[in-house]
Image: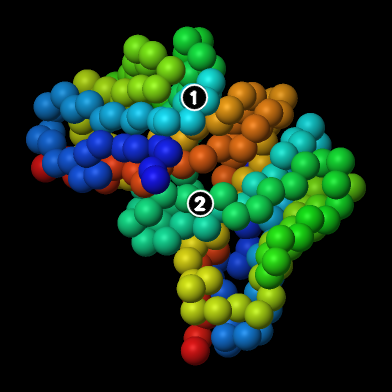
Amino acid sequence: GENVEQHPSTLSVQEGDSAVIKCTYSDSASNYFPWYKQELGKGPQLIIDIRSNVGEKKDQRIAVTLNKTAKHFSLHITETQPEDSAVYFCAASIEQGAQKLVFGQGTRLTINP
Amino acid sequence: DAMVIQNPRYQVTQFGKPVTLSCSQTLNHNVMYWYQQKSSQAPKLLFHYYDKDFNNEADTPDNFQSRRPNTSFCFLDIRSPGLGDAAMYLCATSRDRDYEQYFGPGTRLTVT
């Protein structure tokens, strides 16, 4: 079955710097890749997603890139702010469309003021 | 305005005592999912409903069952909770098969 590896497990950056989180997936049939932000005691919040027919997508300070050949995708956060501190999960869909997600292990991002 | 609502937010149950967790949605989405998330781990899919069709994951224990009486509501029943079932239980919805999943705030289950 699908396996998603996420790195790093923890990341600490200075406020204003950029943060990059990387994921690899194993199933070449996966075609949907969302990123979720989870704050302590809350449910995951969808922050950006990308489908396999697109190489890059950007939304203000957040961007996601996808390399289908290498089977990896990355989350880029620029101009980081303290409120970006959270756990971030990548995921990949298996089967058709976004029906079932397999999550990476998560990255705990800390923004230092 | 909450769109995916989970009740209760915190639930304490005794070992072996059946417990039911509730999820409701105001989005009229066709698909509803239940995930289990243990401390410092990723969410793990237990099962999902596509409309009235129930889809169980192969490794979901028989102890976990679900009901979806209508489009808006979905329940997670744990027949005989064990200490290992203590976790955050997340409900998510999706408009249809090929759409984004939106999560509720979760119910944290403690088993004593």
Instruction: Check disc 2 and report its element: helix, strand or loop.
Output: strand
Residue at (77, 36) in percent of width and height: A31
Picture quadrant of residue B3: top left
The residue carrying pointer 1 sits among few (fewer than 14), some (14 to 19) or many (20 or more) residues within 10 Å by Cα, namely: few
Can residue B75 be seen here? The reply is yes
Vertical placement of A78 versus B38: above or below?
A: below
Residue at (56, 50) in percent of width and height: A46
Which x, y percent locates residue A111?
52, 80
Q: The disc labelled 1 sits on which kind of residue?
A: Asn
Are marks 1 and 2 in one subunit?
no
In this figure, which residue is indicated by the disc labeled 2? A45
Alpha carbon separation for disc pair 1 and 2: 19 Å
User: Which sits in the foreground, A23 or A20?
Assistant: A20
Picture quadrant of residue B82: top left
* Mark 1 touches mark 2? (CB < 8 Å): no
Which x, y percent locates residue B85?
27, 37
- Classify the position of the N terminus of chain A by image quarter: top right
Q: In this view, does B28 lie to the left or right of B63?
A: right
Vertical placement of B70 versus B45: above or below?
A: above
Can residue B84 be seen here? The reply is no
Residue at (56, 74) in percent of width and height: A11
Vertical placement of B99 versus A5: above or below?
A: above
Q: Is residue A44 left or right of residue A33?
A: left
In this figure, which residue is indicated by the disc labeled 1? B28
Residue at (16, 24) in percent of width and height: B18
